[in-house]
Amino acid sequence: MISLRKLRKTAKSFKEKLALKHDETNVDQILLLDEKTRELKTKSNDLRAERNSASEAIGDAKKAGHDASDAIKKTRELGDHLKELEQTLKEVEYQLNSLLFQIPNLPHESVPKGSDELDNIEIRSWGKKPVFSFHPKNHLDLGDALELFDFQRGAKISGSGFPLYTGQGAKLERALINGMIHHHEYAFGFKELFPPVLVRKESMETTGQLPKFKEDMYHTEIDNLYLVPTAEVPVTNVHRDEIIDESELPIYYVAYSPCFRRESGSYGKDTRGLLRVHQFNKVELVKFTTPKSSYDELETLTAQAESILQKLGLHYRVVELCAGDLSFAAAKCYDLEIWAPGEEKWLEVSSCSNFESFQARRGNIRYRRSEDSKVEFLHTLNGSGVATPRLMVALIETYQTEKGTVFFPDDVAEFLGIQEIS
């Protein structure tokens, strides 16, 4: 959620930054509702004070032995008027908050301008594209030959987009999850959490999935709970409605969870195999920081996510997203893309984002500098560390052999606990 105070002061630049994100929110309507809300609050406070004075007059009249009927009548009239005014205020505040929850975060001033992913900027790359003496297979052919996945039976169980990992494919998936969590915990000091995968509406609102992206979420109507699209949701909400002492910051969390996404907007995209699925596994990194340190933490977070790809020896690049390609909640974001030689294309496996105070405002997550200072909204960041489906695609395609097996170099095998898949 954005700061109304900031919006009042910088409405023009606010509109310009929203336009960079292709957002058409009626800012003028928000300002009108904000002004009306403040006017109604002032009137309510004045009327409440007047009613209290009238109530005191009743007591004074009775003590003096005078007729208090006029004062009683006035108090009732003022009470009725106040009740009507408070109902109007409630309705206007609801309209205002509904609009505020639809506004995306503003891009940071350092974010490059651009319309879509074609305007994103490659910042750096690591490693080289693997060279083969044979024509490399894609993950579908490898998976079929090595019996790593069973998409047909997965579809029989749950429908398309729900892969069934089998045999060595299941073992590799589990090895990746365990290896990544262990690495982030012991190399960088992240604290592991194992969160629920069903969350309340308020949790989804905090991180920005709701209300704007409701159609992309899996929802249980009876209990009014949502399946998480990422562990970011439950982990960020760990500190919802809390005040954290500055001495405790930064806070680093790492969490694994299955992730569930309807992907209602994926029509026309490559949905073969593991490239785009409804259920997948992901290790998530979440940080709570002070505003002063959040952009340094973003650079560190990105490097921490990169370290997994380096451990696995995969060729990757870091891409800075332009304003038009930023997510709803992000102020700045780097994507990590790995090269999949069988697919012959880059695959995104991580987005590392700084949300500044956007999520903290929605979730009322604050920090205090000292006992005597007022509380402030902290900054939240997160990044995939990383998502497994496309990681597995690149991994088995990169280390495939001419005889159709997958053989990992010793350092990669040490990380995974697996040397060969045959």
Image: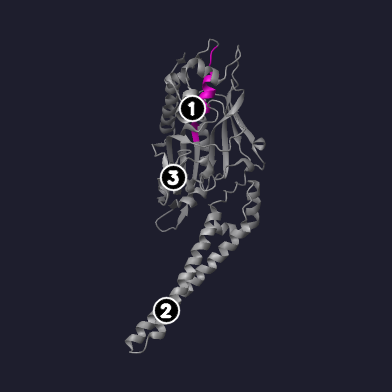
Query: Relative to the observer, which residue lies in front, 57 or 338?
Result: 57
User: What residue is shown with label 3?
Assistant: 221
**Residue 383 x, y percent position in the rendering:** 50, 37
- What main secondary structure does the magenta stretch of the protein show? helix
Q: In the structure shown, which secondary structural element does the residue marked by tag 1 occupy?
A: helix
User: What residue is shown with label 2?
Assistant: 75
**Segment tinted magenta in the rendering:** 384-401
Query: What residue type is disc 2 on?
Result: Thr
Query: What residue type is disc 3 on?
Result: Glu
User: What residue is shown with label 1?
Assistant: 155
Which residue reaches farthest top? 403
Query: What residue type is disc 1 on?
Result: Ala
- Magenta span includes 389: yes
Which image quadrant for residue 58? bottom left
Which residue reaches farthest front? 156
Query: Relative to the observer, which residue lies in front, 373 or 236?
Result: 236
Q: In the structure shown, which secondary structural element does the residue marked by tag 2 occupy?
A: helix
Identify whether 137 is placed above or below 21.
above
